[in-house]
Amino acid sequence: MDFKNLVERISQQYEHKLPFVVFSSENSETITCYCQNNETLYCDASLSKNGFVLAPFDSRLQSYLIAEEESERLETRLKPSEINTKSVTVSEFEEAKNSYQEFVKQTIDIIRKGEALKIVVSRKKEFPLSNFSIESLVERLFSAYPTAFRYIWYHPKTGIWCGATPETLVDIKKSEFKTMALAGTQPYSSGEIVWRKKELEEQHFVTVAILGNLQGIIEDVQVSEVRSHRAGSLLHLCTDISGKIEKEHGSLSKVAQALHPTPAVCGTPRNFARDFIIKNEGYAREYYTGFIGPIADGGTSATLMVNLRCMKIENGKASIYVGGGITADSVPEEEWIETQNKMQTMLQVLHPML
């Protein structure tokens, strides 16, 4: 099946309000699609069923699955290329800016009192869609961001969720395990890359916390040097972590529970940061900073990604979710600018539909 025919098939599925998911891994030209043949919303807390999972930020809520056995599996190839449009200008109310910066200040105060090392705060911005097209969404998202994991999920009970995420939560192939510690953000440029103390410290917190959470589950752990990782028009600091799953104590579900939500999207210590976010952020994240991805072989093979650089599309509007890690050295104005930069990833996909 060629890409054009796949887009037409997805359009038919959407028109009939039938669930589907279409996705492509980073640096891959292969696009995979599951078109579910019924309207059932399947749950999979065990992460043991083959298909594609959509899990929320708050792990006390339900995870959903588009089940492979209830779907038609389609595949095609497309060579992606970066979207080279100019930044999309966004009008922001001064009230929204002041409110977010005040929230960042409140978070910094909590951290400086010693109650946390890092807390990830976020916001969402809604955009009315005057010219939405599922065909255009598929074509633009999968023609761009080759270094990211790209996906579009649709179920009539959840709406559309889609994104281009740079962060792996867990990659498992039988007993082989991989994850990453991702943190720190700056705009990509062709010049020399310089990271400040704040970003280096933030990334260190993430690495240490992940290694601690994996104790007793992963053995023969290998940790890479810190590197710069490009995600579209942004750069992040990244440490690669790998090892083997302990036979007696490890499973995909246990590994995901140990890692999610990561310090990169929640904070350190995790329980304090998560409770602070849920209580103070002012909106429900839903599946933003949850995780998504394909599961195969009954859960012994999977690529689960943190749901970043994403948006929800429902009822004629797109909600784009953006945030950043706050430490004692954070500057509220800079954190606001960081969210504006991160918003560009999805805005450049949406641009013709606004």
Image (tube, helix red, strand yellow):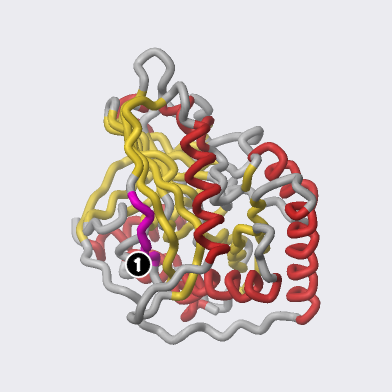
On screen, residue 336 above or below 45: below
Residue at the image point whose x is 35% and y is 58% from the top: 227
**Residue 296 on image: x %, y %:** 32, 32
Residue 226 falls inside the magenta stretch? yes
Residue at the image point whose x is 54% and y is 43% from the top: 262
Residue 263 falls inside the magenta stretch? no
**With 162 as the anchor, is 158 left or right in this view?**
right
Seen from the viewer's position, the closer of residues 184 and 2 is: 184
Seen from the viewer's position, the closer of residues 266 and 77 is: 266
| Residue with the mark numbered 1 | 145
Q: In the rendered image, which quarter is residue 314 located in?
A: bottom right
Quarter placement of the C terminus = bottom right
**Residue 68 on image: x %, y %:** 35, 35
Farthest residue to the front: give it.
197
Residue at the image point whose x is 48% and y is 33% from the top: 256
Give SS at disc 1. Answer: loop
**Residue 39 on image: x %, y %:** 50, 40
Instruction: Name the chief secondary structure element in magenta.
Output: strand
Quarter placement of the N terminus = bottom left
**Residue 174 on image: x %, y %:** 28, 27
**With 260 as the anchor, is 7 left or right in this view?**
left
Q: In the rendered image, which quarter is residue 303 located in?
A: top left
Q: What span is colored magenta in the figure?
A: 225-231
* Mark 1: amino acid: Tyr
**With 42 as the anchor, is 117 left or right in this view?**
right
Farthest residue to the top: give it.
248
